[in-house]
Image: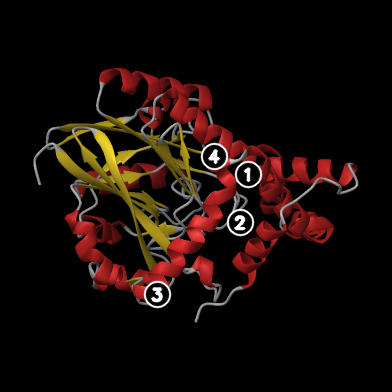
């Protein structure tokens, strides 16, 4: 391949937890299965490090689960090797400033470049610029962060500051090269992105991004071509094992971006399934069915009215029962474990994913639930929450 032709591979959530803990420790290459040769063909590999790599043992109070890898797990990144680790997510600060500092030190030791978090605000928000053969690549990484952002000076992650992110994208665009925006945001397990995510990702393209890629929902979502540039809303899980038998939480895909002279020439999806021993590529009919489903997911994204109806379909699915269970669960936790309950409640009113869901759901109820929604989207949503892995 000529020097000015490169492939950038972007993967989603990597965390050596649960069943993957002993595998990454003892056989770091093995967890990638038959996907490893494809990973190694890329010129630049980027992954989301969805945990702290630390020996610290005191987690912070937060809304969701806490994840931790040990420093020794970092060999699972360098074994590929991944050259870049995105840290703007809702777990790298699970063990506070100590956990983040340890993670940065471990990544440096293993020659993995961090982006999206830092010990001060400037470091957290600084884009990563690197030369890949003769091509300059810029990576801007931000997230919702679940309040663990560097907005008050740090330490923390690059949080939900869209104006700042857009300004950084525009600055990198002016310098030349290829600009990738990677964001960790959205509503977990839902096949369609909320409107605020769609608006944010489009704003990054408007600012000059050549490609925008999302993760955090833990399930695959669709792809939109906006102004001729790809927006990949969610890659699903990667090296992230969940204790579930639901199919769409046990599959995901990497994105291979093929560039010619710093311009995007091809986008390829590399789908795989996930089980307790690692990753396995999808082949033949399984790969074709996966591609067909991604295409169906993507269809409403290009049409404002259809995208709105897909989101309304999820609000209908969530329903009064879902809202009530969530609120009562938080209130019960506040009685039995006040710090945890308080963190959960604060998260619901400060994090965009929950705040926007509650606002839109309550607005729908105030209108008597009469907003039109897509029946086809409803069927896909039902599949995402019910289909079992075979």
Residue depicted at 49% across the width and 54% down the height: 58
Image quadrant assignment for residue 210: top left
How far separated are the C-alphas under marks 3 and 2? 24 Å
Question: Mark 4 and mark 1 in contact (Cβ < 8 Å)?
Answer: no
Question: Mark 2 and mark 1 in contact (Cβ < 8 Å)?
Answer: yes
Residue depicted at 45% across the width and 31% down the height: 227
Which label lies toward us, 3 or 4?
Answer: 3
Residue depicted at 67% across the width and 64% down the height: 379
Give SS at disc 1. Answer: loop
Question: Mark 4 and mark 3 in contact (Cβ < 8 Å)?
Answer: no
Q: Which mark is residue 144?
A: 4
Neighbours of disc 4 within 10 Å: few (<14), some (14-19), many (20+) = many
* Residue tagged 3: 285
Residue depicted at 40% across the width and 29% down the height: 125
How far separated are the C-alphas under marks 1 and 4? 13 Å
Horizontal placement of 372 versus 282: left or right?
right
Neighbours of disc 1 within 10 Å: few (<14), some (14-19), many (20+) = many
Q: Which mark is residue 190?
A: 2
Up-down: is 18 above or below 202?
below
In the rendered structure, which disc, 3 or 2, sits on the residue that comes first in sequence? 2
How far separated are the C-alphas under marks 1 and 2? 9 Å
Pinpoint residue 10: horizontal percent, then vertical percent: 33, 49
Pinpoint residue 36: horizontal percent, then vertical percent: 23, 65
């Amino acid at each position: 391949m000529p020097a000015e032709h490169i492939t950038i591979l972007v993967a989603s959530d990597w965390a050596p937890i649960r069943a993957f803990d002993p595998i990454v420790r003892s056989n770091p290459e093995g967890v990638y299965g038959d996907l490893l040769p494809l990973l190694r063909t890329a010129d630049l590999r980027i992954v989301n490090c969805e945990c702290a790599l630390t020996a610290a043992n005191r987690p912070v109070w937060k809304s969701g689960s806490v994840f931790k890898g040990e420093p020794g797990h970092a060999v699972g990144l360098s074994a590929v090797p991944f050259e870049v680790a995105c840290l703007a997510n809702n777990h790298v600060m699970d063990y506070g400033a100590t956990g983040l500092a340890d993670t940065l030190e471990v990544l440096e030791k293993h020659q993995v470049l961090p982006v999206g978090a830092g010990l001060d605000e400037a470091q957290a928000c600084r884009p990563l610029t690197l030369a890949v053969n003769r091509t300059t690549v810029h990576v801007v990484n931000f997230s919702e962060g679940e309040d663990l952002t560097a907005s008050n000076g740090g330490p923390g992650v690059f949080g939900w500051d869209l104006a700042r992110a857009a300004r950084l994208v525009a600055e990198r665009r002016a310098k030349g090269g290829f600009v990738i925006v990677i964001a960790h945001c959205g509503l977990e397990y839902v096949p369609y992105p909320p409107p605020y995510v769609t608006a944010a990702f489009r704003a990054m393209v408007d600012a000059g991004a050549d490609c925008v890629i999302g993760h955090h929902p833990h399930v695959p979502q669709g792809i939109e071509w906006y102004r001729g540039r790809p927006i990949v809303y969610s890659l699903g899980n990667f090296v992230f094992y969940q204790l579930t038998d639901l199919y769409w939480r046990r599959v995901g895909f990497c994105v291979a971006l093929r560039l010619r002279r710093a311009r995007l020439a091809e986008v390829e999806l590399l789908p795989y399934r996930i089980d307790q021993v690692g990753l396995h590529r999808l082949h033949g009919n399984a790969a074709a069915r996966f591609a067909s489903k991604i295409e169906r997911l993507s269809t409403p994204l290009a049409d404002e009215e259809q995208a709105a109806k897909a989101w309304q379909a999820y609000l209908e699915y969530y329903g009064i029962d879902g809202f009530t269970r969530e609120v009562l669960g938080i209130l019960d936790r506040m009685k039995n474990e006040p710090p945890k309950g308080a963190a959960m409640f604060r998260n619901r009113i400060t994090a965009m994913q929950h705040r926007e869901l509650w606002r839109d759901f309550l607005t729908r109820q105030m209108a008597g639930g009469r907003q039109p929604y897509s029946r086809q989207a409803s069927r896909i949503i039902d599949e995402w929450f019910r289909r079992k892995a075979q």
